[in-house]
């Protein structure tokens, strides 16, 4: 209602609406709002496309999302970034199109990206493709040999495949390289302030 009552809409206000629908997984409204933004002659930016692609991913409309990625630069003059590619890899993975997700991850124009490979690894684990999970986790380890998350993901992939000996080897490698898993933290609200625990 507030959006509809605004005298004019800039890119940020359109992004907020598209992002809202994307969070709800309402792909129809994401695409409809994006179309209205285009008709209103408001230029989309990088954030717009992250929201649109995320919405396509959560709504399971992979063909539309893939088409948007292909048109970003040619029609909208927005160069895809790692976040856009990660959204599309996630989207293809959720749709079970693992080979297409893999090909995109391998051929990303900006080079190998841990963010993209994490999205691919997650998709492989969701669909139970343990061989590709291990492959993706090893790629991550090559890209970020000092990042604890890469070891944890590889260990989890081996664990899911019941390769417990390999899990032990990963943990041994972590100790050998002095890589420690970062502790998790949560935020809770107490009274008027936020506390970290």
Image: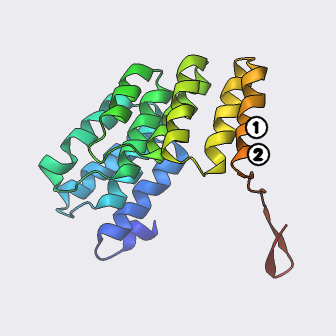
Look at mark 2 in the image and give the residue it sits on: 175
Mark 1 closeness class: few <14, some 14–19, many ≥20 residues within 10 Å: some
User: Does residue 174 appear left or right of residue 92 in this picture?
Assistant: right
Q: In the rendering, which numbered label is found on residue 171?
A: 1
In percent of width and height, residue 81 lies at 32, 53
* Residue 179 locus on image (x, y percent): 70, 51
Neighbour tally class for label 2: few under 14, some 14-19, many 20 plus, Cα within 10 Å: few
Label 2 with label 1: CB-CB less than 8 Å:
yes
Using the rendered image of the protein, determine whether residue 176 is visible from the camera's viewpoint: yes
Query: Mark 2: which secondary structure?
Result: helix
Quadrant containing the C terminus is: bottom right
x and y percentages locating residue 186 in the rendered image: 78, 61
- Dividing the picture into quadrants, the one containing residue 103 is top left
Which residue is rendered at x = 25% and y = 49% of the image?
35
Assign a secondary structure to mark 1: helix
For the residue pair 4 and 197, the one nearer the viewer reads as: 197
Is 33 positioned to the left or the right of 67 in the image? right
Q: Report the residue at 38% width, 43% height from top.
A: 112
In the rendered view, tell whether residue 59 sits above or below residue 38.
above
């Amino acid at each position: 209602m507030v959006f509809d009552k605004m005298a004019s809409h800039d890119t940020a206000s359109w992004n907020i609406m598209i992002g809202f629908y994307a969070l709800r997984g309402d792909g129809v409204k994401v695409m409809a709002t994006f179309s209205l933004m285009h008709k209103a002659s408001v230029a989309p930016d990088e954030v717009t496309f992250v929201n649109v692609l995320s919405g396509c991913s959560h709504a399971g409309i992979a063909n539309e999302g893939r088409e948007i990625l292909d048109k970003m630069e040619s029609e909208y003059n927005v160069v895809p970034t790692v976040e856009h590619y990660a959204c599309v890899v996630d989207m293809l993975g959720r749709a079970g199109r693992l080979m297409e997700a893999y090909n995109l991850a391998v051929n990303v124009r900006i080079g190998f990206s841990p963010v993209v490979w994490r999205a691919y690894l997650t998709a492989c684990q969701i669909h139970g493709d343990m061989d590709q999970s291990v492959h993706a986790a090893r790629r991550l380890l090559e890209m970020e040999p000092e990042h604890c998350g890469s070891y944890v993901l590889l260990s989890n992939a081996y664990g899911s495949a019941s390769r417990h000996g390999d899990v032990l080897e990963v943990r041994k490698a972590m100790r050998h390289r002095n890589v420690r898993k970062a502790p998790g933290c949560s935020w809770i609200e107490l009274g008027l302030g936020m506390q970290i625990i």
